[in-house]
Image (cartoon, grey):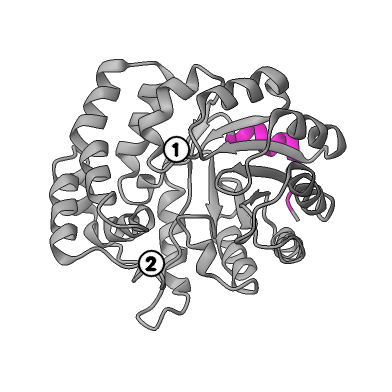
């Protein structure tokens, strides 16, 4: 059981950079616990405000409902309270509640509620889904607004009244008008998280809308770059931000955009590039080609921390 209240967890993650560690797999696609432990311990050595176990970059969608709590437990055990650990949950309401309860029992500090599986629903149905998950646990819950689970400001306001442990809103659609309306309506009742793929590209304009943090997937394999970029965003250093986007983020996006699913696959490839191979992605995702991995390696090699990382390995 978490020692943090939902409000304490929300305040903690809102004050710094967040990341979603990959879930390492062996060649047979089974969970590689030893590598996961090593990766989590390594990432805790950097300035990160929270780690999301079995999240989107952690291939939540390819894990079984019983695997998720196990992955979360390993994360909780390995981080040893150094950073908050939040767990992914989702699918249908019954499964989402089951995963949420299991994650809470393993010691997770909070939950990220991903969109329901496959189906679209009206606002009342989505609200019932969120409330059902919130009422099943005492830890804080963050809703992920994207795809088929786009909550409108009125719906969020009602949920905030009914669910004290609903403490976060993660945006994954990039609708600036909606984000503005949500923040204007709810203010500091929620912690706001930037959750678009490669969130660094949206970080500065989102900061001006009250979104103080975002989830950095590249933190998995270039944590020094990711933390320095976040610091530049928070101090509104346009020159440093532009350089980071031009020299690394935008070229990385160019590779990522070549195939569907590469938003996750390119992070696994990055782990391989730095010598922390975390295995393949599970189907239906596909891994980068060897040529694409070589292109990614060339990008990483140009970063200032590359020499330090290689020396550490």
Q: State the image coordinates of residue 125 (x, y, percent, origin top left).
A: 77, 49
Q: Residue at x 53, y 38 (%)?
A: 49
In percent of width and height, residue 97 lies at 76, 61
User: What are the residue bounds of the magenta stretch?
Assistant: 2-13
> In the shown orientation, is residue 190 left or right of residue 53?
right
Per the image, the residue denoted by label 2 is 285
Residue placed farthest to the right in the image? 162
62 horizontally vs 292: left or right: right
The question of residue 8 being in magenta is answered with: yes
Quadrant position of the C terminus in the picture? bottom left
Is 19 magenta? The answer is: no
Q: Quick check: 196 above or below 68?
A: above
| SS at mark 2 in the image | loop
Q: Quarter of the image for the N terminus: give it.
A: bottom right
Neighbourhood count class around disc 1 (C-alpha, 10 Å): few under 14, some 14–19, many 20 upward: some
Q: Dot 1 corresponds to which residue?
A: 47
Q: x, y (%) of residue 236?
A: 38, 16
């Amino acid at each position: 059981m978490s020692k943090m209240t939902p409000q304490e967890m929300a305040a903690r993650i809102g004050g710094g950079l967040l990341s979603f560690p990959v879930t390492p797999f062996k060649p047979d696609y089974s969970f590689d616990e030893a590598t996961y432990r090593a990766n989590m311990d390594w990432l805790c050595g950097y300035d990160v405000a929270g780690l999301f176990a079995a999240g989107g970059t952690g291939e939540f969608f390819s894990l079984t409902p019983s695997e998720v709590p196990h992955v979360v437990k390993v994360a909780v055990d390995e981080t040893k309270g150094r950073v908050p650990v939040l767990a992914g949950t989702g699918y249908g309401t019954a499964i989402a509640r089951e995963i949420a309860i299991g994650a809470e029992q393993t010691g997770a500090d909070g939950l990220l509620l991903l969109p329901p599986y496959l189906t679209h629903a009206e606002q009342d149905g989505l609200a019932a889904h969120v409330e059902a998950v919130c009422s099943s646990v005492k830890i804080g819950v963050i809703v992920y607004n994207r795809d088929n689970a786009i909550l409108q400001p009125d719906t969020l306001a009602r949920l905030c009244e009914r669910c004290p442990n609903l403490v976060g809103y993660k945006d994954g659609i990039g609708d600036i008008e909606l984000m503005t309306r949500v923040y204007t309506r709810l203010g500091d009742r929620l912690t706001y998280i930037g959750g678009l793929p490669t969130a660094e590209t949206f970080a500065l304009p989102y900061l001006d809308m009250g979104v103080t943090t975002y989830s950095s997937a590249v933190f998995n394999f270039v944590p020094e770059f990711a933390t320095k970029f976040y610091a530049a965003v928070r101090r509104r250093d346009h020159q440093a931000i532009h350089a980071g986007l031009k020299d690394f983020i935008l070229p990385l996006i160019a590779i990522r955009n070549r195939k569907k699913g590469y938003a996750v696959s390119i992070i696994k490839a990055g782990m391989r590039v730095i010598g922390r191979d975390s295995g393949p992605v599970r189907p239906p995702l596909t891994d980068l080609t060897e040529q694409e991995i070589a292109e990614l390696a060339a990008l990483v090699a140009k970063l200032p921390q590359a020499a330090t990382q290689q020396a550490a390995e």
